[in-house]
Every structure is written in C-alpha cells, then in structure tokens.
Image (spheres, rainbow, N blue to C red):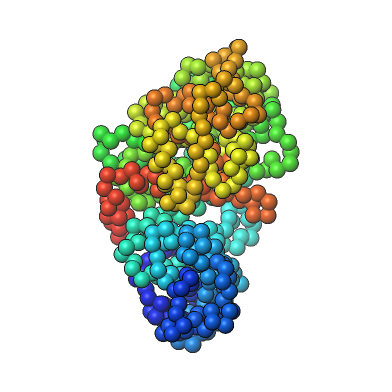
C-alpha cells in the first residue's frame, strides 16, 4: 500500500479525487457556522444528533454535492487521542467495506505525531488481508491512502516512520500467519535473504555450522524434527563501523508441539505463531532497509521446529549450551528459552551496546498481562525506560516485570548448572531469569509477546507486534534523526 501525506484544509479536502473520503471529526473541531461542503454537512449532522457522540460512530453519504469523492464517511474521534483516532479510522474503513475503494482520502482536522501514527497504523491494520494459502484469495483492494492534515511539515517525520513501520508489520504478519508447512526454517531463511541489499547483509548457518559452533541447546530442540534448523544472522550497517550495534534476537520455533511434553490438541494449530519473535525481527529489518537510519543493528534468528519423534530430547536430558553451561531439560515444551540462550551467547561476538530478545515465551505472561501489553524484563534501567517510552510513542505498549535474584532459586538443578523451568509460580519471570544467565554484562531486555503477537478466536491472526515498538526504539537511537528523512527520500527518488 502506498501512503501520501499532503497539507490539506477541510475546504480543500472536498476537491480531492479519491474513491472514498474518511473525515475524522474531533470534539469541537466543527463549528455550527463552518463553511465548505464537508464542514457544513458534518456540522448539520452533529446538530441533528445523526453523527453520535462516541468515538467510532459514523455517518456516510454518497455523491455529496460539491465533493469530488463518490463516498464520504464522517467519523467521531472523541478527544483526538491515539486510541480514539484508531477507533475512528477502523470504524470509517468498516463503513466502506462494501464499496471496496482502491484510493482513500483520510482527513484529520488537526494532527500531532501521535494522531498521524495512529491513523496510518489503523488503516493498514483495518485493510490488511492474508491471502498466501487461499485458492481464491480476495486481495487487499486498498492501494493508496492520502493522509490530509493542516500542518503536514510538522508531522512529516512521524508519517514516514509510521508508513515504513507498516511495511515491517505486514511482513511480520505474513510470516507469522503462514501455516507451518509454508513457513519452515528454510523458508524463514529465504525470507531473510530476500531483504539483503544496501547496508544489509544476511548469513544463514545450517546444522553442521551450528554443531561446529557448539550450540548444543539449539541442536537439542531441533533433533525431533525432519526439518533442518537454520540460524539466521542479519547485519544492518547504517552508521560508522566504530558504533557498537544493537542486537535483536527473535524466537523462531516455526511449529511447537511441545515435544515429548506434548501440548493439548485443542488450539495447537496456533503454535504456528510461535515464531512471531522471528517474524518481528524480519519486519524490523524490512523497515530499516526502507528508512535506512543511522544505526547499526544485528538480528539473530534461531529457527527450528519442536517435534516429538524418536530423536527428540526427553525430560531429564542434560545438554551443553554454547556458553558452556549445562541445562537440565525438565520440560521439552520450554524450548524457546533453549534456542534463545545460544543466540544470546552468539550475540556477544558482535560486542553490542544492548541486546533485546523477542519471544512468544510463556503462557504465564498471557495470564499476567493479557493481549494489551507485552511483558518487559530488563537488566538495565535506562534500557527499560527507553523501551517503555518507545512502546507508548508507537502505540505498542509493554509493561516492566521484576527480575529479583530470588526468582532464580526455582531454576536450581542437582544434575546441571541450571534447569530450563522453575515451576508454575512466576513462570514468565523465571523464564526471563533463565535467559538473563546467558546475556552477559551487556544491557539486556526480554520482550515476552505471548499475549500480544497474535489473536485467537474469530479474529485469529498475527498482530505484527512488537515491530512498532522496536522500530521506534531503534530510530530514537540515532545521533542525527534527520538522517532518516534524507536517506528515505533519496531512496524514494531512486
């Protein structure tokens, strides 16, 4: 989908030639004596009570006099907060579903960076369709969105960041939504290789290379599957070579049966989403390739299946990780932390200034936070604050949970250096404490996205989170934010 930002007053919006126009109305944004066809129509509707008062309530018109667009939808956005803007845009698009417009004008009477970000992300979310494995797919009909705001220059940066983030979110959704037989470890590696280009290099390691490195924990999880593992390394070099990179690690379990500790059959199909962390890392790098910011980023994706064949690891087995630490596997369904721990050790070779791992790691985090906020654990307060702030700014929030040393007591083992599970109490925390053992002295954070990476039920599908959070955080790492816009515009002209 193509996005365009244009300086636009309401009086000018009436002349925009698009298939449909969604006009977002904030509280107090239209006066009774307003001039212009759109303003008069909305003012009259408000006076008559036809537009309602609640965010998301809408009124539609066809062939409104003096308006170029065939269809117009006015929709309430309350106080103009990001949450209300997202509600309004989603409702406005819903009102147009039967019309299937190819071009859409989205008009905000006033806009700050948060409202623009909300509008762009909301229309992308509302119009998204998964089609890859459908025999007769109905592709997304919306091709171009024109966002009209009075002061476009003031929100240019936010608009470009949001539009590029959509690209990354939709790539993450695509790979997380694919069934496991269409998203094998080798397929993920091919998707990563397709991102290679200026400033972005990709290396893929197979089972033999991983074995030579000594990644015993990753190898142990992959043993039960006929699909060979892949360890994917992405390197984006947007800043000078002397600048230490940030390392992102994404859990890439392309299907999780639980292994010998087999999961219940009900809803096991949703375990195709267990590689949502890996999909998010791919999405972040797709956004980096488009914006080309002045940062250095390393991405690591350990990818494999967790299956229960005769070669699979068993409860009670002890394996040696890349760090040299031995791990007693008490539950084979706690496999994500096993593949991540080797990736955390591998990340040290890049001498990163921070490491963030992203994983659908624990059901306990779902119980704690539901699907609203991702769980955040961090060894460094400054890193935690930066990620929390980025999540709020990107409307992809997280919540910090504790890492007290006392929680590590549950992971003690008589037969190895550490056990891979610590029982039901504080399961999300003990999982994070396990990972912390392998992060070294580098500032490290862990995002548990088990509750936010996908939705179940009738709305089943990937959300693309936490791509917006991570993109925002990385872009804020730049010493010169304006470099983003210079490089993005240069790329657009090429």
Q: Residue at x 37, y 26 (%)?
A: 349
Query: What residue is drawn where x is 43% and y is 85%?
Result: 33
Residue 215 shows in this picture: no
Q: Nearer the viewer, residue 428 or 342?
A: 428
Place of residue 143 in the rendered image (x, y in percent of width and height, measured from the top left): 48, 66
Residue with the most extreme top position? 414
Answer left or right for 137 relative to 82.
right
Camera-side residue of 458 and 134: 458
Screen quadrant of the C terminus? bottom left
Rendered location of residue 44, percent (x, y) = 52, 84
Residue 136 in the image: above or below residue 103: above
Residue 362: x and y in percent read: 60, 35
Residue 377: x %, y % from top left: 49, 34
Residue depicted at x 70% and y 43%: 267
Residue drawn 51% across the image and 27% down it? 404
Instruction: Compare residues 370 and 46 and report the one nearer the observer.
Output: 46
Horizontally, residue 258 falls left or right of residue 428, namely right
Residue 330 to residue 369: above or below: above
Q: Residue furthest right?
A: 265
* Res. 406 visible in picture: yes
Count of numbered circles on the image? 0
Q: Quadrant of residue 254?
A: top right
């Amino acid at each position: 989908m193509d996005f365009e930002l244009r300086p636009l007053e309401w009086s000018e919006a009436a002349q925009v030639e698009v298939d449909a126009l969604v006009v977002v109305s904030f509280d107090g944004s239209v006066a009774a004596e307003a001039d212009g066809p759109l303003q008069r129509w909305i003012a009259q509707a408000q006076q008559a009570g036809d537009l309602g008062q609640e965010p998301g309530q809408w009124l539609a018109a066809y062939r409104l006099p003096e308006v170029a667009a065939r269809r117009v939808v006015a929709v309430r956005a309350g106080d103009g907060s990001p949450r209300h803007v997202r509600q309004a845009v989603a409702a406005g698009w819903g009102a147009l579903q039967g019309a299937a417009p190819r071009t859409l004008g989205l008009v905000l009477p006033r806009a700050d960076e948060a409202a623009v970000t909300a509008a762009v992300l909301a229309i992308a979310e509302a119009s998204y369709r998964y089609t890859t494995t459908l025999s007769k797919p109905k592709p997304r009909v919306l091709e171009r969105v024109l966002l009209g705001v009075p002061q476009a220059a003031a929100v240019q940066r936010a608009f470009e960041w949001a539009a590029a983030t959509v690209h990354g979110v939709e790539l993450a959704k695509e790979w997380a939504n694919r069934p496991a037989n269409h998203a094998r470890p080798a397929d993920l590696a091919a998707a990563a290789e397709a991102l290679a280009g200026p400033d972005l290099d990709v290396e893929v390691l197979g089972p033999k290379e991983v074995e030579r490195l000594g990644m015993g924990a990753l190898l142990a999880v992959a043993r039960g599957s006929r699909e060979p593992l892949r360890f994917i390394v992405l390197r984006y070099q947007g800043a000078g070579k002397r600048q230490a990179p940030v390392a992102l690690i994404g859990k890439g379990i392309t299907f999780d049966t639980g292994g010998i500790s087999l999961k219940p059959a009900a809803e096991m199909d949703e375990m195709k989403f267990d590689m949502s962390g890996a999909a998010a890392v791919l999405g972040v790098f797709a956004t980096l390739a488009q914006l080309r910011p002045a940062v250095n980023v390393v991405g690591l994706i350990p990818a494999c299946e967790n299956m229960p064949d005769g070669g699979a690891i068993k409860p009670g087995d002890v394996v040696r990780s890349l760090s040299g630490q031995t791990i007693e596997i008490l539950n084979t369904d706690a496999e994500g932390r096993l593949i991540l721990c080797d990736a955390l050790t591998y990340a040290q070779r890049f001498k990163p200034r921070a490491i963030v791992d992203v994983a659908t790691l624990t059901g306990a985090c779902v119980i704690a936070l539901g699907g609203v906020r991702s769980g955040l654990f961090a060894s460094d307060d400054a890193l935690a604050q930066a990620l929390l702030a980025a999540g709020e700014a990107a409307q992809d929030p997280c919540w910090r949970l504790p890492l007290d040393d006392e929680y590590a007591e549950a992971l003690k083992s008589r037969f190895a250096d550490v056990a891979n599970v610590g029982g039901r109490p504080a399961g999300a925390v003990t999982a994070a404490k396990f990972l912390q053992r392998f992060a070294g002295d580098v500032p490290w954070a862990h995002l548990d996205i088990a509750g936010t990476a996908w939705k179940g039920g009738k709305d089943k599908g990937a959300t693309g989170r936490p791509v917006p959070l991570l993109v925002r955080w990385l872009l804020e790492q730049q010493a010169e934010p304006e470099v983003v816009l210079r490089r993005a515009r240069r790329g657009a002209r090429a």
